[in-house]
Structure formats: C-alpha cells, structure tokens
Amino acid sequence: MPTTALRELRKALGLSIGELAALTNVSIGAISQWERGESTPSDSKVHKLADVLGVDPGDLQHEIQATRLAYVRRAVAKIKSGRIASSVAK
C-alpha cells in the first residue's frame, strides 16, 4: 500500500490513528479511509486536520485528492484486469 501524505504527516508528529481521530473528533475508521483514499473528508474536516497537523488546508486537500485519485485508478485497473469478480454480472 502506498504511503500517503496524511499518513506521513500523522506519523511525523508521532500520532496514532486513534490520537488523530480524537484530536479531530472523527472516527478511527474515517481517518483510516482518508489515509487509504477510500473516501475524502469534508472541507471542515480538512481544515481541522490541517490545524492539528500544522499544514496549509489547501495543500492538505490537494494531497488527499491525489490519494483518492490513485485509489480509484488502482480499483479501475483491478476491474479491467479481471482481478475483481463482478457480482453485478451474476
């Protein structure tokens, strides 16, 4: 799994996912999904994350969107290569 900017920032500050979740008032699952690119936080959550992590919200939003795009590209590649069986076709 590729390392994401959000994960790198969190780890650089010595924070666990649980600690970042508590500081931003979101679930551990949400932080995990954002780090993997499975979903993206709302603008208000990006601002809270940026505040806690000490970075510019615009820069963080850009990095989160890049992570999301990479996740979607990997998923599409898996589908195209047939590595993901389509339950819809059944």
Image: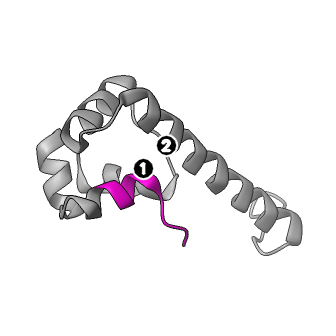
The span shown in magenta is 1-9
Please, what is the three-letter code of the amino acid marked with disc 2?
Answer: Ile
> Can you tell which quarter of the image residue 18 is in?
bottom left
What x and y, as percent, mark residue 77?
Answer: 80, 63
Neighbour class for label 2 at 10 Å: few (<14), some, many (≥20)? many
Do the CB atoms of the residues marked 2 and 1 lie less than 8 Å apart?
yes
In the displayed structure, 14 sits above or below 53; it is below
Q: How is the image coloured?
A: one colour
C-alpha span from label 2 to label 1: 7 Å
7 vs 63, left or right, is left
Disc marking residue 47: none
Q: Is residue 88 visible?
A: yes
57 vs 23, left or right, is right
What x and y, as percent, mark residue 21?
Answer: 19, 50
Check the picture and name the quadrant holding the N terminus.
bottom right
Q: Secondary structure at mark 1?
A: helix
Please, what is the three-letter code of the amino acid marked with disc 1?
Answer: Trp
What x and y, as percent, mark residue 26?
Answer: 22, 43
Q: Secondary structure at mark 2?
A: helix
Q: How many marks?
A: 2
* Residue at which label 1 appears: 34
**What residue is rendered at 37% in x and 60% in y?**
8
**What residue is rendered at 32% in x and 52% in y?**
31
Residue 49 part of the magenta-drawn span? no
33 vs 83, left or right, is left
> Can you tell which quarter of the image residue 80 is in?
bottom right
Disc marking residue 64: 2
